[in-house]
Image (cartoon, rainbow, N blue to C red):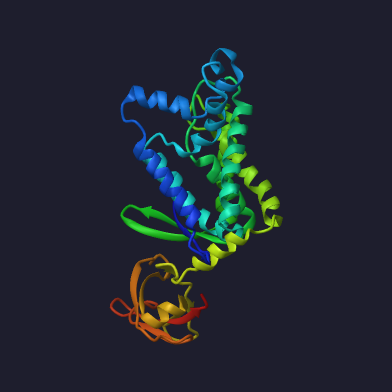
Amino acid sequence: MIPIRDTIRSRNYPIVNATLIVINVAVFLLQPTNATELQHFVITYGLVPARYTVDAISQYFSFGQQVVSLFSFMFLHGGFWHLVGNMWFLYIFGDNVEDRLGPIRYIVFYLLCGWASALAHLYFNLYSEVPIIGASGAIAGVMGAYFILYPRARVLTLIPIIIIPYFIEIPAFFFLAIWFAIQFFSATLSGTAGGSGIAWWAHVGGFIAGIAFLGFFTYFPRFGASDRVRRTTVKKKTPKLQVIKPIRGTEGYDVYGDLSITRLEAFKGTRKIVNIPLGFRKRLFRVTIPPGMKDGATLRLAGLGEKIDAKKRGDAYLKILVKSD
């Protein structure tokens, strides 16, 4: 299963979330490529539990280096797919959490979750000399917050069946609960990150920390600067890809659904990619919305309704819902 996006539209552009992604990518590109230099780099800026618990090792690091590595490890990645996987999950879930907390509270929340995930890993791996790197602990905290904030959201998931893309919406509560269960049981079975190379307890700790910190940050007052930023980052467009939930007509073979756009898109016109699931037929279609579209207007998509016979199908009618910005 490959998560594509969630169904909760954030009202603002996630500038902090996007900046975090850019920083992670930039650090990855700046990491040494030479094996020996990379190993030294990871040991210096990654999280090595033995650096804090074994005197013979800790004496080689200054106090500043010890503090820095508790945060720097979450911006390092061991490979391209490690980076892509982490950034993709941050992209999917981070924008909505930033939308709820605001940019300033969100960056503090993110860093604290990463720090808490480091402490969780240290607690269960006190004398490990294996360095851990990656943003997954901090991202787990973001997912924990999302789990509480948007339990009824749905995650649009791609399930490739041979060469046919099959899209299904999975409840976020179920998606994240399964993810956490996998992390927890993997942590209890593996014990440390030495065997699998994955810091399972950091994921577990980060997820729990995200839930715990959310309660504090929700009641912590917003900064005035944060509100000013939010006013300048309001989104002017709806998602490019939208899943239509078709309603079958009482008679005939036509189906009906809703398509959301913003006032700017209604004024200028736009193009969307829609998925209209009918049984096992879940193809993607391009829809052009002409300029000047009014709220409540209907678009007719010929031949996208129920099957009539081997050559004919009914039509699909999409009601345009113009959302306020």
Question: Residue 24 appears at what percent x and percent y?
Answer: 43, 43
Rendering quarter of residue 207:
top right
Question: Residue 229 appears at what percent x and percent y?
Answer: 53, 62
| One can see residue 1 in this view | no
Q: Nearer the viewer, residue 248 or 133?
A: 133
Q: Is residue 79 left or right of residue 247?
A: left
Q: Is residue 227 left or right of residue 77?
A: right
Say which residue appears at 46% left-offset and 24% top-offset.
43
206 is higher (above) or lower (below) than 313: above
Rendering quarter of residue 301:
bottom left
Say which residue appears at 45% left-offset and 54% top-offset.
18
110 is higher (above) or lower (below) than 54: below
Say which residue appears at 50% left-offset and 35% top-offset.
72
Question: Residue 319 appears at what percent x and percent y?
Answer: 46, 82
| One can see residue 68 in this view | yes
Question: Residue 27 appears at what percent x and percent y?
Answer: 40, 39
Rendering quarter of residue 126:
top right
Please, which residue is most extreme toward the left here? 311
